[in-house]
Amino acid sequence: MNKAIDPALMHAAEVTGSQVAMDAHWMPFTANRQFKKAPRLLVKAQGMHYWDVDGRQVLDAAAGLWCVNAGHSRPRIVKAIQDQAAEMDFAPAFQMGHPKAFELAERVAAIAPAGMNRVFFTNSGSEAVETALKMAIAYHRVRGEGSRTRLIGRERGYHGVNFGGISVGGIVANRKHFGSLLTGVDHIRHTHDPARNAFTRGLPAHGAELADDLERLVALHDASTIAAVIVEPVAGSTGVLMPPQGYLKRLREICDKHGILLIFDEVITGFGRTGSAFAAQTFDVMPDLMTCAKGITSGTVPMGAVIARQPIHDVFMNGPEHLIEFFHGYTYSAHPLACAAGIATLDVYAEEGLLTRAKELDGYFADAVHSLKGEPNVIDIRNLGLIGGIELAPMVGEPTKRAFNIFLDCWAQGVLVRTTGDIVALSPPLIVEKSQIDQIVDTLRAAIRRAA
Ligand SMILES: Cc1ncc(COP(=O)(O)O)c(C=O)c1O
């Protein structure tokens, strides 16, 4: 029996969660029952827009899921993927290689901070995080400091959904159902401080001293047990939190003082989101390891990566040459389709100046999102580059509902935004035009007023 959804059916009001066609797909990070009662189905994408099954055009204010940085279905990227699929579908990633994997690694290294020039490919941000955490622990062991196994994350951090990532992560809903998680993990305090920093444009003035919380954990556990600290330079999924001025530099200094590796999770900030290729460059702080994904292929083919400082890589390159140096990898690491997509994506970024476009639009975007100050229930607004966060007062007894209602309202009005908790997150593709920023903010303003 053909269970595919008949698009014609989707127009019918009686299409609900009871229909067979929607039962099998257990959707990720979705209110499944609500969705299946009133599906929001996308069938086409081009540039800044999606189209739904009813043929409605929807402006994408979320770059899909923070990943479609070059805009949708860009012909150059599409062609590269098509050509690659026809030429060579797959190449084994272990003990074999293919030229585009090396080419993409060189290209990524060329736009990464100087000295971060060794690239290990994965298939997602979550896998990049697991890879970086394992790399950090193994690095210390290989160079003779095997006692450094402890991993430090940060409260409210999001590092994907695998066990390492949720263990160092600090979002309770992502942790509480999943048992005891990894052992040997601790967390520094988060930096969200609306009492001092609400409605800041760009980086908050207050909170650099929160980096000193790492000293507390060093005093508690001893530096000799700590392998690495992982933070998002700008936290996305927890509600769009900007690092306080000077915070990341201070964290870097404390890591240096104690021989602790610093990992930046750049899964959302990588590839132009903050106005530079990576947030490490925007903030002028070089981590030891950097995770990325999403924008590496502009969301077209799943891919992630860990970018390492060369000395970290070099520590592994010892012992007999026929032996594998790092026992880690995925069947689809450096998949040919992803590599082809990645190379074409980097071409588009370079030709159109997209990696720095968020810096050019920063002022306009900031004015637009901060114009929402004073609207009902807006309790904070945060921005940097092409990232915006609008925090709303929760409805009494029903946390997250106000933001979710606003999300549904914006969708109905033809704009796709993303919400997390009671925060609306904006992260449009880097090709966004000023008039589209206006459309996003005007639609959001009307929805916020209706949700009052
Ligand atoms: C900072 C960060 N790390 C990791 C991830 C996980 O990436 P993925 O969903 O590709 O596994 C995300 C996803 O949004 C992220 O924002």
Image (spheres, rainbow, N blue to C red):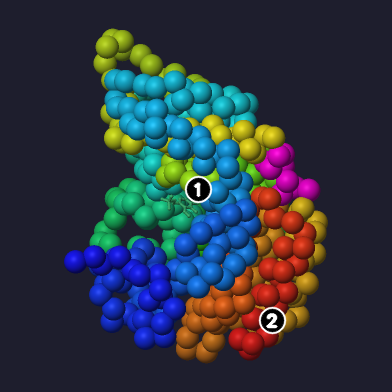
Q: Secondary structure at mark 1?
A: loop
Instruction: Out of 300 and 4, give the one closest to the viewer.
Output: 4
- Residue 327, quarter of the rendered image: top left
Task: Return the mark for residue 446.
Answer: 2
Q: Is residue 176 visible?
A: no
Position of 181 compared to 121: left or right? left
- Is 92 above or below relative to 44? above
Which residue is painted at 43% across and 32% down in the image?
Answer: 84
Which residue is painted at 39% across and 32% down in the image?
Answer: 86
User: Which amino acid type is marked by label 2?
Assistant: Ala
Q: Residues within 10 Å of mark 2 (few under 14, many from 20)?
A: some
Question: Most extreme residue toward the front, as rendered?
Answer: 8
Give the quadrant of the C terminus.
bottom right
The magenta region covers 352-360
Position of 248 compared to 89: left or right? right
Q: Is residue 378 magenta?
A: no
Task: Return the mark for residue 299.
Answer: 1
Q: Secondary structure at mark 2?
A: helix
Give the quadrant of the N terminus.
bottom left
Position of 377 compared to 86: left or right? right
Q: Residues within 10 Å of mark 1 (few under 14, many from 20)?
A: many
> Residue 328, image x and y in percent?
30, 32
Of mark 2 and mark 1, the one earlier in the sequence is 1
